[in-house]
Image (cartoon, rainbow, N blue to C red):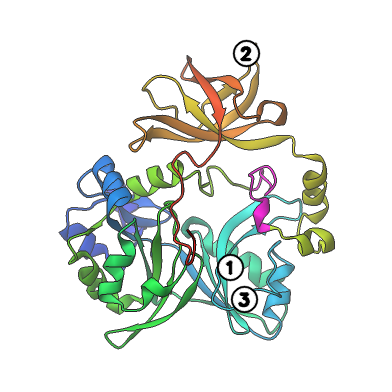
Amino acid sequence: MSSETDAADTLDRLPLDSWHRERGGRMVPFAGYEMPVQYEGIIAEHLWTRKNAGLFDVSHMGQLFIHGRGADTALEHLMPGDFQFAADMKPKYSLLLEDDGGIIDDLMATRRGEDFYVVVNGATKYGDIDYMQRRLPEGVIIDHMKQQALLALQGPRAAEVLESTVPGVSELSFMQAGPFRWQNQNLWISRSGYTGEDGFEISVPAIAATALADAVVAHELAKPIGLGARDSLRLEAGLPLYGHDLDTRTTPVMAGLTFAINKRRRAEGGFPGAIRIIAELDNGPVEKRVGFEVEGRQPVREGALVLDREGTEIGKVTSGGFSPSLQRPIAMGYVAAPFASLGSELKLEQRGKLFDARVVAMPFVPHRYYRKGAA
């Protein structure tokens, strides 16, 4: 009993901690915080978000403001993104890399004039900050925005819900961001998210987070949603999770994230691991991240082995679960490149039991991002 209490005492609490508990949120340890894993049940919350709008508290994420002369050039020495020519208010997905090309973290970076607003993963944020501070030149400063909460409203009705609270947000297109005002508070809102659905991520002063969350869920189409549904939604969307599908042993090419390296950066290099990554772009990696369609009804979880027809180990499952939308098990993982072709029939081994699986395209459920002007 006392050891559990001591462990809980070491966890940080979100600005909305009391708000979650009042709504029946079941709190669990995650990324150094106590966070709500569910309220009404993971499947119900998952399906609600696919149909309406779900409000997620992602305040455990690290919000950084990077400023100083030449910040864009400096960031290009840490990541393969094209920051020098990044447009204002357009979030870009990028990756912090080890010198051997392994992934330290994946993140979103948005130019705001000469400066950048960067959101990194909660479990890695302090390591990320330390890594960047050691490598950024003098005069380029990182401010950790600890006074900010971060909320994500996701789902096909998200724009309808948020527009009723913060007028003007529906004018944003996918991967656009901008400043907004709400009840005399400054908000930074991007049309982005981690579910494959349309949606928004809202940076709000922590002191105003409860009032904003109340205003959002006052709408009949919005409900609070926990970590469990966030994970099943992102798996259906084929989106990798750092620490599971991405780590320092994987490269952007192995992970299928080469869209984050544009033509100029491929030609010029100059980022950590460039030699290895460019060689993999030219010749292919030894392993690739793939999606699996699993026979039967039993989910196959992270850590399961991937076997070829002769029973030889050729990879591992890194994420897996039962898809509430598709009503069947799905998974993703890494396999040796010769077995990564769509349609490859493989076996998955979990606790001594074998499951038939086939390599399929991701996402498992089509993305429904909103792009202004798209047909």
* Residue marked by disc 2: 309
Numbered tag placed on residue 129 in the rendering:
1
Seen as rendered, the residue at the extreme front is 375
Main SS of the magenta segment?
Answer: loop
Numbered tag placed on residue 87 in the rendering:
3
Quadrant hosting residue 288: top right
- The tag earlier along the polypeptide, 2 or 3, is 3
Q: Nearer the viewer, residue 332 or 32?
A: 332
Give, as a single range, the part of the protein colored magenta: 248-260
The residue depicted at 61 percent of the width and 29 percent of the height is 342
191 drawn magenta: no
- Could you tell me how far apart the alpha carbons at marks 2 and 1 are, in whole angstroms? 45 Å
Residue type at the position of mark 1? Ile
- The tag earlier along the polypeptide, 3 or 1, is 3
Secondary structure category for the residue under label 3: loop
Residue type at the position of mark 2? Arg
Q: Is residue 25 visible?
A: yes
The residue depicted at 66 percent of the width and 44 percent of the height is 250
